[in-house]
Amino acid sequence: MNLIIVESPAKAKTIKNFLGKDYEVIASKGHIRDLPKSRFGITIDEENHLVPAYSVAKENAAIVKEINALAKKSDTIYIATDEDREGEAIGWHIAHAIKRDPETLPRIVFHEITKTAINNALLNARKIDMDMVNAQQARRILDRVVGYKLSPLLSSKIQKGLSAGRVQSSTLKLVVDREREIKAFVPEEFWTIDTLFKKDIEATLIAHKQEKLSKLSIKNKEEADAIVESVKADSFVISKIETKERKSATPPPFMTSTLQQTASSKLGFTPKKTMMVAQALYEGVKTPSGTSGVITYMRTDSLNLAQEAVSAVRGVIESRFGKKYLPDEPKVYTKKAKGAQEAHEAIRPTTLAFTPEVAASFLKPDEIKLYRLIYERFMACQMNDALFEQQSIIFSGKENEYRASGRKLLFDGFYALTGAEDKDKLLPALKEREGAEIQKVKQEQHFTEPPARYSEAALIKKLESEGIGRPSTYAPTIATLSNRTYVTIEKKQIIPTEIAFTVTEILEKHFPNIVDVSFTANMEEKLDEVAEGQNDWQKLLSDFYFEFDEKVKEGKEKIVSLKIATPLGRPCPKCGEELLLRSGRFGEFIACSGFPKCKYTEQVEGEAKEGEEKSNAHTSDEICDKCGKEMVIKSGRNGQFLACSGYPECKNTKSINVEEKISETPCPDCGGKISLKNSRRGPFWGCENYPKCTFISKFEPTTIKCKEKGCGGALARRTYRGKEVYECIKCKTRTPVEDIE
């Protein structure tokens, strides 16, 4: 009997189906030997080498025993873990766990789980690559050093439950830096001159009085008005007509990062979901010929394609679309980034006969969506480029010059498969030196927008471009930031929490290397060099460790503690642990001592520590309109507010940051009174019947109703980009004041 050891049970089941009774296939279920969970697990030897103390965790003891029992009965034991560094190291650990010399066990790799690929792998077994194993060991030890030494320091200085990581912390800094840019952003006013020449030709003003204009050239209304007057008084001729052929290049095949990005934008999948679905497609799904893997390995940063696969897809393209859609030679794609593992393949379907149409009868809904994306991208990457005619017309006047652009699809190329995303914008047939008349011209005010927050897909693209992490780390890194409450993800935007700023600021000051993007990327390159046999992994570790360890020791002495917590003597209503009074960036708050397992918090609204004065509260002349007790002035994250002194029996609060004001207009939803209130996002108008009525508006409504079809919402008068407008509270339609009054 022969034994094949893989990582996943699904993969084991698929491979077992391909092989006869002479083979047994078992799954290790991932790592079975690792650094210990309860202690550092790394010692320093006499040569200043970092020595890991690996052990088999209790939960893995049973699977090790099972593998060992099968190994004793086997003639040959094949290590068939995943084809990346992690898989190479897992195979090495398995050999040690079953007390076999890794050098003696044949190692087989395959990019796809098909019968042909498995049989070829068995015929071409190799030894475990120790350079790859050492690169993974170095990564694991680096991550343990940073996490094990820095996380407790942050927990002791800021708050319990915080963590830091080599890739995690530099990724968090990217998110925090983007938020800093957004907060520091000052909108800049600019104006556009929107112009139509006759025959509905949209044109862009490119020069005025011999000066070239950029997007932000026209700064204010006065300048815009002057240019409009000049344009209206000008006479124009068509001074130049250009047509050029342009190609729209075929997209490269997918690798991990681009698959995650495209699945996010086109399917709405999170990176984590994309990898889960891709894993199922790789490890084995039902097909007409039985269970088989239908895509190649999904953790890759290579754009290589197997020659056999390219030959096969070229045949399909020619038979389905015709010879004119097939390039004379196969297209070859390469990745310029350092560290790309070109020995691997890009992500592609394993069997072209398993078309998306056929697959629809076998795959789950999410699986077919992702499979179609992969299948069509693979076909498209070997088709001919699309061909366009780029059109350009220059309209010249005495003082002004315009350009109009358009394009026409001449040959659809790969768009025949994927569909063209951009519609043609055709310009009418015109002649040079022909006169041209203005059909419509108007100026419009704009303001520059702050940079957008990262989406998960955009952050992965940034990580890849900066060289931070590798395909297997993108999705887990973002998941860790979310799980640790460093970020929240709202409407696909990654938003850092307050604690993210605090942690990043401390790391920037005391551990700049850990959050430095270039340092993290440089470390990835060094790990790649280890994998290629060009760098010594122990030197890499010692060069980092001793300097970092000294900084941790300094940090314990020099970092000022922000961790002020006073027991309140009452239990958490969620988990029963004691509640603590803490200090944060916005003043005091109450939090559960069981954090991070329990995330219960309260605002400080009148409760003081036993035996002390309510130092955060000051008396006022106000009386609580709910229970009749005195109201006190409190400080919160939004400034001062009034709170009932009878808290917690009475939790009534009132704003004192805005002038108390009752609107003359009744609530448009229920007819009740609406008044000006305050919140963490600023003043707003709210209904007195809350929570039964949830009406809110940033602006005071009027009795005028919206005339948009089917709306009828109340209009509120406000200033929008320097103009007085009425805005509908329901549909948000804005109408200039003069159009209504």
Image (cartoon, grey):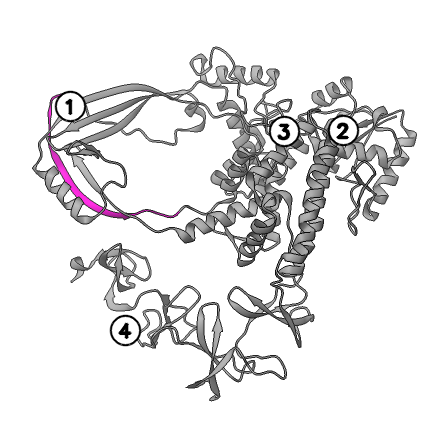
The span picked out in magenta is: 433-450
Give the percent coordinates (x, y) of residue 203. 21, 33
Question: Which residue bears the numbered disc 3?
Answer: 294
Q: Amino acid at mark 2?
A: Ala
Residue sitting at x 50%, y 25% = 252
Amino acid beneath label 1: Ser
Q: Is residue 191 highlighted in magenta?
A: no
Which is more foreground, mark 3 or mark 1? 1
How many residues crowd mark 3 within 10 Å: few (<14), some (14–19), many (20+)? Answer: many
C-alpha distance separating marks 3 and 4: 63 Å
**Which numbered dot is residue 665?**
4
State if disc 1 and disc 3 touch (CB < 8 Å).
no
Quadrant of the rendering where the C terminus is positioned = bottom left
Whether residue 547 sits left or right of residue 460 in the image: it is right
Instruction: Count neighbours of disc 2 (C-alpha within 10 A) and say few if under 14, some if 14 to 19, many if 20 or more.
Output: many
Residue 518 quadrant: top right
Which of 606/626 is in front?
606
Helix, strand, or loop for circle 4? loop
Q: Which residue is mark 2?
A: 80
Q: Nearer the viewer, residue 383 or 22?
A: 383
Residue type, numbered disc 3: Val
Quick one: SS at disc 3?
Answer: loop
Q: Earlier in the sequence, mark 3 or mark 1?
A: 1
Look at mark 1 in the image and give the residue it sits on: 239
What distance separates the C-alpha of mark 1 from that of mark 4? 59 Å
